[in-house]
Amino acid sequence: MSDAEENGILELDSEDGDVEMSLMSEVVYSEELPTYKSVPKGQAAPKVERTEFNDNPDSLFFNDGKRRVDFVLVYEDESRAASGKKASIYKRKLRRRECFEGNLMNMGVELEATQSVVDEKLCFVKVHMPFDLLCTYAEVMHIKLPIQPNDLASKSNFITKFFYPEQEVLLKKTKFFTAPFRKDQLQYFYIKDRELFFTPAMRSRMAYYILSRAPYDVNGNVRKFGISKLMDAGVYKAAYPLHDCRFNVKSQEPDCPNERFLLYNEWAHPKSFYKMQPLNLIRKYYGEKVGIYFAWLGFYTVMLTLAAVVGLGCFIYGFATRESSTWSKEVCDPMIGGNIIMCPQCDEDCPYWRLNITCESSKRLCIFDNYGTLVFAVFMSVWVTLFLEFWKRYQAELEHEWDTVEYLQQEEQPRPEYEAKCVYERLNPVTQTTDRVPYTACGKCMRVSCGVGTVLFWVLLIIASVVGVIVYRLAMFITFSQKLRSDLKDLEPFKEYVTPQMATSISASVISLIIIMLLNHLYEKVAIWITDFELPRTKTEYENSLTLKMFLFQFVNYYSSCFYIAFFKGKVVGYPGKPVYWLGKFRNEECDPGGCLTELTTQLAIIMTGKAVWNNIQEVLLPWIKNLISRHCTQVGSEKVIPRWEQDYQLQPMGKLGLFYEYLEMVIQFGFVTLFVASFPLAPLLALFNNLCEIRIDAWKITTQYRRRVPEKAQDIGAWQPILQGVAILAVATNAAIIAFTSDMIPRLVYYWGFSVSPYSAGTTHTMEGFINSSLSVFNTADFTKKGRPNDEILRASNVSMCRYRDFRNPPGHYYEYDFSMQYWHVIAAKLAFMIVVEHIVYFTKFILSYIIPDVPEALKEQIKRQRYVTQVLLHETNIRHFTELIKPVADKIHDQVDDPELDLDFEDA
């Protein structure tokens, strides 16, 4: 016998010498539930009452019409098909299910089983929590409940109220002061109807609390427990709370609130795209965790409106001034750009070319590379600070309104996967008692090291894929340079638009998007596996660990190609006589004479648009197709009536990670909007359109295609808040670097203020005329190396002695031939100075804004103080009354003895 078995920590069921095929870890249950009563050994567990469906498809109650269904368990009866080894597995499942249901009933939970209308093998076990049991667990879970109507009037915004759903439709409820529930003070809580005192979301949350902790196998001190493990083992097929009605048809039940129907019509339906979200109803129906996600997404979308308007204005300004740009005119002028012969951009096979063929790309560059972009980049740095600070204020208001300000988070129960492997002992430094842990200090170090190593391997894999795309760009640029212009010579309208640089950039962007999606799909599984291997103790620790891994990977995966184009491409290329080679073979690619900013813009537009379209199609089609197939496979005659619980079973289950992927998608988008917005002012506008669709798609998805999720409490957006703050800080540096090193704004300013006048030029007034000539260096074609020299066919077709290339270098014949010129060092100094000054100004502005904007509004602080005061007064009065009731019998006895002088007073007996 192993040490684990001797210690009673881990036990695998075996029957007839067979161990479960899955070798699934069992769980030690270490804490007693308040209402748990063990079944005496040898006594049979109570049986669940079985009833027939009463042909009421809208019923949310047991057959008696009084007891509400708070949760539903679904299992498959395999008794008919069980034979041989399957019979042994079936008996094990049956024993566990009967024990689990018997223990639930011993705790006070009421159960009722009904056979499926569609599939005779399925059975639905309805779970009901009696009022007394709800009171017990409301106190255990510190659920806040109303004690007195709120006498503080809430403010309504005159402008936004027209965009809210009709309050009459949503049945606006009275607001209350609340306090953590105490069963011994029940009479002091605001109870008008015992059946409505606990909302359906509260009832479902308490039911799941019991289901996740109820034992299903007891062997001495070892108790295996939890509905999750039973579902993983196949004992139950599903467990979920009920929707209150169909999403598109009102319930015929007289007391049904039809909240799902209201949510669909006022929130999830496309016709409601312009309306504000009914957050209170979302929170009431799905819980605070879902409510806070949609509140954050809605607030982010509203704030994007301002950024989108300013970005659109910047784009319109650039578009309107593109024809009047001096440097663009020089590129397009046949007498200037037409007479400038550029050096070949690859070895041997690339021809000489004239600058004016990039006329259209130069005009496109002017749309994004202008002074408006600088203003917009600074604006976005301020905008992101305002967004985060105002979100904190809005979040504080939601915390107050949703009773999570003083949310007492219970010490989280260890995850079953963690407890199952607790075979080692360690001294608890707090309690000085012995605790069981699943690994030693060395084992934990090994697990963490393995996880870090795996993450680094996948990050390096992404970098390798980026290098592969770069090699593709280098190889395809040569091909496009040779073939593209000759293939398009008959398509004159397209010839000026489709340049080798543009064709290479677009095709590489599409390949990058495909690689991103593929690696993303694979790494999701790897990240989950790594996190499972690390064995975090609680669900919060698990989610935080997974969040960090996923975001780190996604950050490198989605942004690596953008960082390459923005900060590496065209920066180390040498000059025509001495180019820089990758792997000793591929010549490093250069930027277009207009710069790399156009390529960065193209990359962002393709990735943002492609990712948004793909994710939205996936979110709509996948659950819809799955449900369509499910309905087709379980199609029954139209004469049969299907109960509410069976209609919900045909919907898709919510994923175990819940809203994790929704947050991840939006945070990645937030990075695109902030990190590279200086190159693409339309990014906030694209994000705004996507989010308007995303809100309704997510709403439609969870309202119509998925089972109702178990409500969860949440105070904020969790680990995503510091991630957003980190992205906001990094965005200042990236946008300053894009303007300084990727765009041509600084070289143009240096030329305008320093090199357009004496002593560097004959002019006496500052001007941009001559900038293109100044930004292109001269190269003597006789200085080509043998490897880089154009082939004989190109040499015969052209008689070129001098060509130009994009750089600031001394001309041939100079004492420091082809070395960096004085203008280059002026430009570098200006770029570094610009970055330092802009970063410090923006960071200082962010700091000031963060300081002067309080996280909690003053009016809200008064409301919180008022609620605390009312709660304290009421609880104090309650304690006095309770003490008075306890002392009254003693006081009455003393009073009677004092009034009777013949009695011998004995106060000790009294």
Image (cartoon, helix red, strand yellow):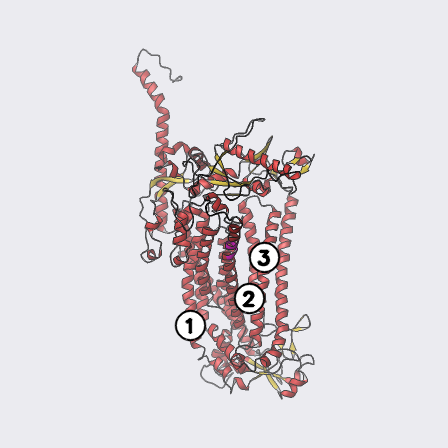
Residue 183's x, y, as percent?
Answer: 41, 33
Residue tagged 3: 521
Q: Is residue 832 visible?
A: no
10 Å neighbourhood of mark 3: few (<14), some, or many (≥20)? few
The image quadrant where one finds the N terminus is top right
Describe residue 348's horizontal placement relative to residue 248 as left or right: right
Name the quadrant containing residue 305: bottom left
Determine which residue is flagged by label 1. 316
The answer to which quarter of the image holds residue 487 is: bottom right
Report the magenta residues as a range.
Answer: 621-625
Q: Give the position of the C terminus as an image quadrant.
A: top left
- Separation (CA) of disc 1 from disc 3: 38 Å
What's the residue type where badge 1 is placed? Ile
Horizontally, residue 475 falls left or right of residue 399, namely right
Which label was assigned to residue 562?
2
User: From what the image shows, is residue 3 above or below residue 295?
Assistant: above
- Please tell me whether residue 822 is drawn above or below residue 690 in the rendered image: below
Q: Amino acid at mark 2?
A: Cys
